[in-house]
Amino acid sequence: MDDLATLDATAQADLVRRREATPRELVEAAIARIEALNPELNAVVTTMYDEALAALDRIPDGAPFAGVPFLVKDLGVEYAGVRFTEGSRFLRNNVSGYDSELVVRLRNAGFVIVGKTNTPEFGMYPHCEPALFGPTRNPWDVSRTTAGSSGGSAAAVAAGMVPMAHGNDLGGSIRYPASCCGLFGLKPSRARNPLGPRYGDIMNGGAVDHALTRTVRDSAALLDATSGPDVGDPYWAPPPARPFMHEVGADPGRLRIAFSKEPPGDHPVHPDCLDALDRTCTLLAELGHDVVEIRPEAAYSEAFGTALGPYMSAAVAWILGYWIRELGRAPEADELEPVTRTYWEFGQTVSAADYLLAVEELQRVSRSVARFLGDHDLWLTPTLAHPPHPIGALVPDLDDPATVERLNQFVAFPGVLANVTGGAAMSVPLHWNADGLPIGSHFLGALGDEPKLFRLAAQLEAARPWAGRRPPVHAVTVTEA
């Protein structure tokens, strides 16, 4: 049972299927790992041990992931009767009154949810350092950020607490922490997974749910278990021709992959990230793919960047408006972090016309990028423009422009483009720098391109395996000590 921390979800489920382990053994082992590692990493902010042990008696017969322990990010996805804060002091005492459809599907697949993971306030920042719970620390170097907003989930998976954990993504929040924590992070196509029952979509389809995983096959198998429209959804993603798991190991063919070394805005890129990009391009060429340096110009336009301002500010205004309605009161002065309050106040000045004009521009960019991806299978960039920064370095202070610029430089490559276009995208952990910090490679595809991404990701995983790499803070290390 000491080896469970090294096994992915598929392998743990196989143990149960072969009667070599029980669901209770898997869950109790995960609880022990969380208890051992969380004091150092602060990845899990709400434990659900009693709920998890009670759920063992309700696992459906034949569930594909019977007994596999799972963590849910404390953002966007609700579990009835459990604290739900979205990383904000405004919601510190909030308890969910219903189950999200994603939670229902996870339970139907046999997963046992053992807790909730840390996230920045309302998930709006590419770090994981909320004032409510404090920072989550990176298992590869506990002085460094996990990025965000799914930073708690990323740290938990990288450290071996659980084999996979939920994340969601409105601008890179699955892919950024995947890069910083050495994990595979797939952002699915718009509407691939359900957001109900409360939401039909979020921010014009920008927000999506999925997970952080150590292996490509886990990501594909999980998507098979959870994807598909919910009753009453306003639209849904193109249905796959076959299960996503069938793409893992399938020949990706000879792909034409565009790549870019320069982000919009002339932001500097760290040499380690450029070196990782060069090595990824070399690997792709060795695998028989055509690699060409070219970029989708619309993603570099000033109009695209300008439109993102009212779009994201409107998101904060909507989030606060939603919770004010639900709680029946506005936040007190000390219940919001200063930057969140500033975004909220600005967001309230964004008119309906301002928002729709921004959406119009973002849709124009989407059409241009779709044409670009008609000529090129995928677009490759570094996931982030810098390796993981020290804890605290990415928390913006609006009175200090240098802190805002540092954050903007960190996320200089437009991960948000996948959310704007609705396309599938992934961060693949192919490289580590001389300091032992992981650096992800980002691939953007078109809407419905998950099969293409899974085929390529599995090919890259076979050529440069990463799942066996363990950070200094890991459950196996704790067990051996």
Image (cartoon, rainbow, N blue to C red):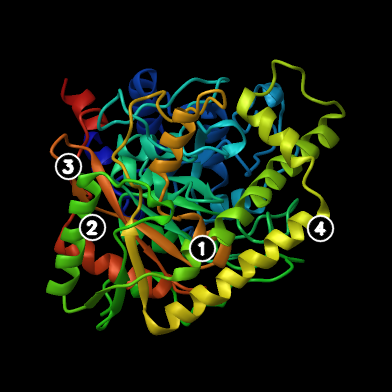
- Judge the density around disc 4: few (<14), some (14-19), many (≥20) Cα neighbours within 10 Å: few
Q: Give the mark, 4 or 2, whose residue is nearer the N terminus.
A: 2
Q: Please tell me which of labels 4 and 1 falls first in the chain.
A: 1
Residue 413 rendering spot, x and y as whole percentages: 40, 53
Q: CA distance from mark 4 to mark 3?
A: 46 Å
Please state which amino acid type lies under the numbered disc 1.
Ser
Q: How far apart, in angstroms, are the residues tagged by discs 3 and 1?
A: 31 Å
Amino acid at circle 4: Ala
| Mark number, residue 433 | 3
Q: Label 2 sits on what residue type?
A: Leu
Q: Tell me the element at label 2.
A: helix
- Left or right: residue 412 versus residue 7 is right
Q: CA distance from mark 3 to mark 2?
A: 12 Å
Q: Is residue 183 left or right of residue 204?
A: left
Q: CB under 8 Å between callouts 3 and 2?
A: no
Where is mark 2, residue-wise? Answer: 277
Residue named by callout 4 = 353
Which structural element holds mark 3?
loop
Which residue lies at the image location 72% right of the left edge and 46% below the top edge? Answer: 314
